[in-house]
Image (tube, rainbow, N blue to C red):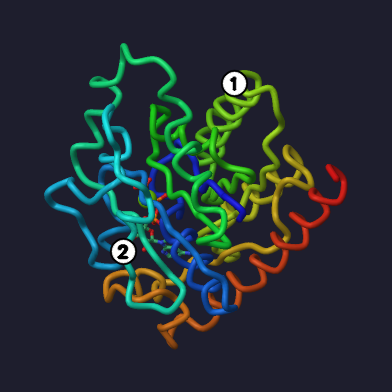
């Protein structure tokens, strides 16, 4: 089982979209995929109409001090073959405050996921745009980190913050987290976008994926209809881009595995 975190402290950069798209593509290839919605705003859960209004069937429950349920018991089928979701709920926004004095809370998710090795092939963690307990849990559990980044000046500053958070967590875990920056919402007709993409490649080199995700209003349409891109023919071009991105990430991941073997 491979665990990927999709994170960036900047909001609205395509984290949830990328999680849903890559998850659907992996499932289409016959993989068993669990999406975990770590954002109290529950956008990913909303995408699949699986919001957990009570909080009783959500990630929130994993953080219960006594007898937390297993992830397998909380995961819901999305209605798409091979694709499950562990929903988010609003009370998750209170976890940082509630658990401030409890020790060992950074690895709760990592520990809960260790029991799922034979259940899923991939687990994708959709992070909130804030550095708090939930993102720390995601980075501690993940073997790979994807950082979707809008190709515009402000988003590059957000990425700097995310890089610092990642390095801080790498130091505290004593391990390197292989990571990739995924340029999203790219508009080749906009000068600022072209310059930002060049800046990204100059600053971060091979960590930036070759495949870029273009701005495409059909991505919003698919989300509004609760459909993964793979089920939304009008978004074919973006689906193909995400498919090429997945190929690239899987090949890069294999290289990482070979080097560390
Ligand atoms: N390539 C794209 N082209 C056009 N719109 C996009 C693209 N990717 C995402 N969007 C839209 O941009 C908005 C933000 O995307 P998304 O929710 O994936 O970002 P996010 O990083 O998860 O945001 P948040 O930080 O709020 O969780 C959504 O309305 C989504 O449909
Ligand atoms: Mg999101």
Which residue matches tag 1?
168
Q: Residue at x 46, y 52 (%)?
A: 15
What label sits on residue 30 in the rendered view? none
Q: Residue at x 30, y 44 (%)?
A: 69
- Alpha carbon separation for disc pair 2 and 1: 33 Å
Label 2 vs label 1, nearer the camera: 2
Badge 2 marks a residue whose secondary structure is: strand
Residues under numbered marks 2 and 1 in contact, where contact means CB atoms less than 8 Å apart: no
Which picture quadrant has residue 14? bottom left
Determine the residue located farthest toward the bottom in the rendered image.
233
66 above or below 229? above
Is tag 2's residue or tag 1's residue first in the polypeptide sequence? 2
Q: Residue at x 52, y 73 (%)?
A: 27
Indicate the position of residue 92 as horizontal and vertical percent values: 25, 37
Indicate the position of residue 147 as horizontal and vertical percent values: 57, 46
Of residues 141 and 236, the one nearer the viewer is 141
Determine the residue located farthest toward the left in the rendered image.
54
State which quarter of the image contains the N terminus.
bottom right
State which quarter of the image contains the C terminus.
top right
Q: Is mark 1 within 8 Å of ligand 1?
A: no
Of residues 226 and 170, the one nearer the viewer is 170
Badge 1 marks a residue whose secondary structure is: helix
Q: Residues within 10 Å of mark 1 (few under 14, many from 20)?
A: few
192 above or below 168? below
Indicate the position of residue 186 as horizontal and vertical percent values: 55, 60
Indicate the position of residue 80 as horizontal and vertical percent values: 39, 78
Which residue matches tag 2?
76
């Amino acid at each position: 089982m491979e665990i990927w975190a999709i994170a960036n402290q900047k909001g609205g950069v395509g984290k949830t979209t990328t999680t849903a798209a890559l998850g659907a593509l992996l499932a289409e290839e016959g993989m068993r995929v669990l999406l975990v919605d770590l954002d109290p705003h529950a956008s990913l859960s909303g995408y699949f109409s699986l919001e957990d209004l009570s909080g009783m069937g959500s990630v929130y429950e994993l953080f219960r001090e006594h007898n937390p349920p297993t992830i397998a018991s909380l995961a819901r089928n999305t209605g798409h073959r091979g694709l499950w979701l562990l929903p988010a709920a609003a009370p998750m926004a209170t976890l940082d405050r509630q658990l401030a004095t409890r020790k060992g809370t950074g690895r709760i998710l990592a520990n809960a996921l260790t029991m799922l090795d034979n259940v899923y092939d991939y687990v994708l963690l959709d992070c909130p745009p804030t550095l708090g307990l939930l993102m720390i849990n995601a980075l501690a559990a993940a073997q790979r980190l994807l950082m979707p980044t809008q190709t515009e000046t402000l988003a590059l500053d957000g990425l700097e913050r995310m890089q610092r958070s990642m390095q801080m967590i790498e130091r505290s875990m004593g391990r390197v987290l292989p990571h990739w920056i995924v340029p999203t919402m790219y508009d080749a007709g906009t000068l600022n976008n072209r310059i930002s993409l060049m800046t990204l490649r100059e600053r971060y080199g091979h960590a930036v994926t070759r495949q870029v995700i273009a701005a495409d209003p059909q991505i919003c349409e698919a989300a509004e209809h609760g459909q993964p891109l793979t089920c939304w023919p009008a978004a074919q071009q973006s689906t193909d881009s995400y498919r090429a991105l997945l190929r690239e990430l899987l090949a890069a991941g294999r290289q990482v595995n070979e080097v560390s073997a």
